[in-house]
């Protein structure tokens, strides 16, 4: 069984090398040579463990992780054999089960708005009458996107999505790209949001408005866990926003109108193994059953007839396309692939 899986992986790598898109020639994150050299899958697991600095507490733990690794590798190989518009690869999540992944690395909680007070977003949609949208937008090339960050084993995606959107509008308004503090939201925005336990971007925007700003990442660095709130720091810089607005639900056109003007916080149903191991391409595969993760839309475009929206994730650069994912658009589904048009919002700020 192991030899058959290795052969499948090698053949997939050979096919991928001749692909006419941006497909990684190592469909599982390793070169053809890497896949041809090991005599056993255990050697591939060892090299992967070294690459991702995985340390196992005991032989029993290592054996259990190895079995999960093989199951995940088989899913990656079988998915890539279908030769779709996207492909999967080995990443830092390869030795954890899908249930463990969902429990530790997601974190969007749209239900908070039902259990607590409703976020008071403006009822206006300032981009409603936007016309003549550019055929493509990439806020990374416009200098409005900070480098990809890593939330780690903590359900703080909502904080990273919020911060990325605020970083974007602040750069657009002031011309200065400043990395801001997810940790402040983790520690201080706790009326309705719950740190590693999950949260919602609108509540986080409301916190920033009510607190007269958010600190920089340099002054308030990320800890990957909830800490003591240090909201008031003398002689430290804060970045303000004037408010926030929701994008009309289930409207691709509305999201594109907003995204043409600034980065947008977006909820997504990311609880699938395909999304867990996404490596590249235009994603239109299996999604989760509910909105459970938060990303930041930073552009849109088209490649080989495939229209997509570019999303910034917070799982580090080893995931996806250097930390980004392209989600297919133009499918005709009101909610979009993985429900990306259900919950989207953005901060507002006066131009200075």
Image: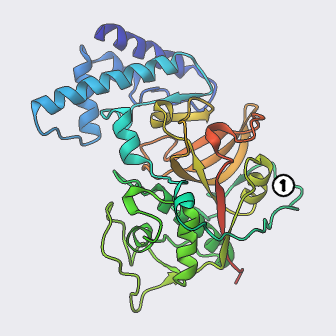
Residue 92 visible in rendering: no
Q: Residue at x 34, y 22 (%)?
A: 71
- Judge by depth and name the residue closer to the eye, 180 or 28: 180
Asked if residue 325 lies left or right of residue 256, the reply is left
Query: Which quadrant of the figure contains the N terminus?
Result: top left
Q: Quadrant of residue 305?
A: top right
Using residue 350 as the reference point, say whether residue 162 is left or right of it.
left
Where residue 22 sits in the image (x, y, percent)?
A: 59, 33
Across the whole image, how many numbered discs are drawn on residues?
A: 1
Q: Which residue reaches farthest bottom?
A: 234
- Name the residue beneath numbered marker 1: 133
Q: Quadrant of residue 257?
A: bottom right
Q: Answer above or below: position of 155 versus 92.
A: below
Residue 244 location (% of width, % of height): 66, 70
From the viewer's perspective, is 133 left or right of 144?
right
Q: Residue 108: where, in percent of width, then height?
A: 50, 53
Q: Is residue 189 above or below residue 34?
A: below
Furthest residue to the front? 115
Rendered-image quadrant of the C terminus: bottom right
Decide: is 94 above or below 296.
above
SS at mark 1? loop
Residue name at image x 59 percent, y 22 percent: 19
The residue nearer to you, when weighing 321 against 129, is: 129
At label 1, counting other C-alpha atoms closer than 10 Å, the crowd grade (few under 14, some 14-19, many 20 or more) is few
Q: Is residue 88 visible?
A: yes
- When the figure is inspected, residue 277 is found, relative to residue 119, above or below; the finding is above
Q: How is the image coloured?
A: rainbow
- At 74% from the left and 63% from the top, the residue drawn is 261
């Amino acid at each position: 069984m192991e030899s058959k899986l290795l052969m499948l992986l090698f053949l997939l790598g050979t096919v991928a090398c001749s692909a006419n898109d941006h497909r990684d020639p190592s469909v599982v994150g390793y070169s053809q040579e890497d896949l041809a050299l090991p005599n056993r899958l255990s050697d591939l697991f060892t090299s992967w463990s070294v690459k991702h600095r995985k340390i196992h507490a005991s032989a029993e733990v290592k054996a259990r992780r190895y079995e999960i690794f093989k199951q995940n590798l088989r899913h990656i190989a079988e998915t890539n054999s279908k030769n779709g518009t996207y492909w999967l690869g080995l990443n830092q999540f390869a030795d954890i089960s899908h249930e463990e992944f969902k429990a530790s690395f997601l974190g969007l909680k749209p239900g908070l708005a039902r259990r607590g007070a409703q976020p008071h977003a403006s009822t206006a949609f300032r981009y409603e009458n936007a016309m003549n949208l550019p055929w493509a937008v990439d806020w990374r090339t416009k200098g409005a996107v900070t480098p990809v960050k890593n939330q780690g084993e903590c359900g703080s995606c909502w904080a990273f999505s919020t911060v990325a959107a605020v970083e974007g509008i602040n750069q657009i308004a002031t011309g200065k790209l400043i990395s801001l503090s997810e940790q402040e939201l983790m520690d201080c925005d706790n009326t309705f949001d719950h740190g590693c336990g999950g949260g919602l971007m609108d509540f986080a925007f409301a916190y920033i408005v009510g607190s007269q700003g958010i600190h920089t990442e340099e002054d308030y660095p990320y800890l990957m866990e909830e800490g003591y709130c240090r909201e008031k720091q003398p002689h430290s810089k804060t970045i303000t926003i004037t408010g926030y607005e929701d994008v009309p639900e289930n409207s691709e056109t509305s999201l594109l109108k907003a995204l043409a003007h600034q980065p947008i916080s977006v909820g997504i149903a990311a609880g699938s193994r395909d999304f867990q191991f996404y490596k590249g391409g235009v994603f239109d595969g299996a999604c989760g059953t509910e909105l459970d993760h938060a990303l930041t839309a930073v552009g849109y475009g088209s490649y080989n007839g495939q229209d997509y929206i570019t999303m910034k994730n917070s799982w580090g650069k080893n995931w996806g396309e250097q930390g980004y994912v392209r989600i297919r658009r133009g499918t005709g589904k009101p909610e979009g692939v993985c429900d990306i048009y259900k919950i989207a919002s953005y901060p507002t700020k006066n131009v200075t």
